[in-house]
Image (cartoon, rainbow, N blue to C red):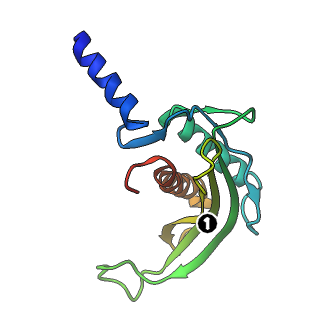
Amino acid sequence: MSRITLLSLLTIFTLTGCYTLSGISIPTGVEKAYVPLYIDNALGAPPTLFIDMTEALRNKVRDEARLEITEDDPDVEMKGTLVDFRVSAEGASPGNETAAFAKLNRLTIVVAIEYKNLRDEADEGWRQNFSNYYDFPATQTLASVQEEAIEDITKQINEKIFNKAFAEDW
């Protein structure tokens, strides 16, 4: 890359007031994030789910936003609460020709997130619930699909949280 191109890119990043990487928008001066352990308010959830979901969000913020995860003088804070973990009976999936016989169960997980930019007093932050679900045949037990289901749901929820916090035009 030529020196002129590099200087042009640096100038653009400086003038915009934030840096952008693959659609991610991090405000100027934001280098550290605090993601405390989720509060566990979900009855019936696996005992370590709130810990696992916290770690997954920390990893996403660290890896994709390239922010340091710390308790010491953070720039942004993302507090979470595991709100709901439930299995419900659902009807057949759309387009299923054997709809009368195809029953599904749905695992749903809900987390509440409170986001604050601690470097910008004018930014009031936000609070929002995020949820996702995983459908599986009623002939299977939750135990037989739980690991895969939780992994999939956690990935989808964290994508939504991350986009709300750091993506442009979310």
Residue 102 x, y percent position in the rendering: 42, 81
Residue 162 locus on image (x, y percent): 50, 49
Give the quarter of the image for residue 14: top left
User: Residue 57 falls in which quadrant of the image?
Assistant: top right
- Number of labels in the image equals 1
Residue at horizontal 36 percent and vertical 85 percent from the top: 99
Q: Which residue is mark 1?
A: 110
In percent of the image, x 58 and y 38: which residue is there? 59
Q: Extreme top residue here?
A: 3
Write the residue at 48% across / 36% down.
64
In the image, residue 170 above or below residue 137: above
- Does residue 36 lie above or below 64 as drawn? below
Lateral position of residue 6 relative to residue 24, left or right: left
- Residue 135 percent coordinates (x, y): 48, 69
In the displayed structure, 156 sits above or below 13; it is below
Name the quarter where the C terminus is drawn.
bottom left
Q: Quadrant of residue 74?
A: top right
Q: Residues within 10 Å of mark 1 (few under 14, many from 20)?
A: many
Viewer-nearest residue: 25 or 86: 25
Q: Is 47 situated left or right of 54 in this image?
A: right
Q: Nearer the viewer, residue 11 or 85?
A: 11
66 to 25, vertically: above or below: above
Q: Quadrant of the N terminus?
A: top left
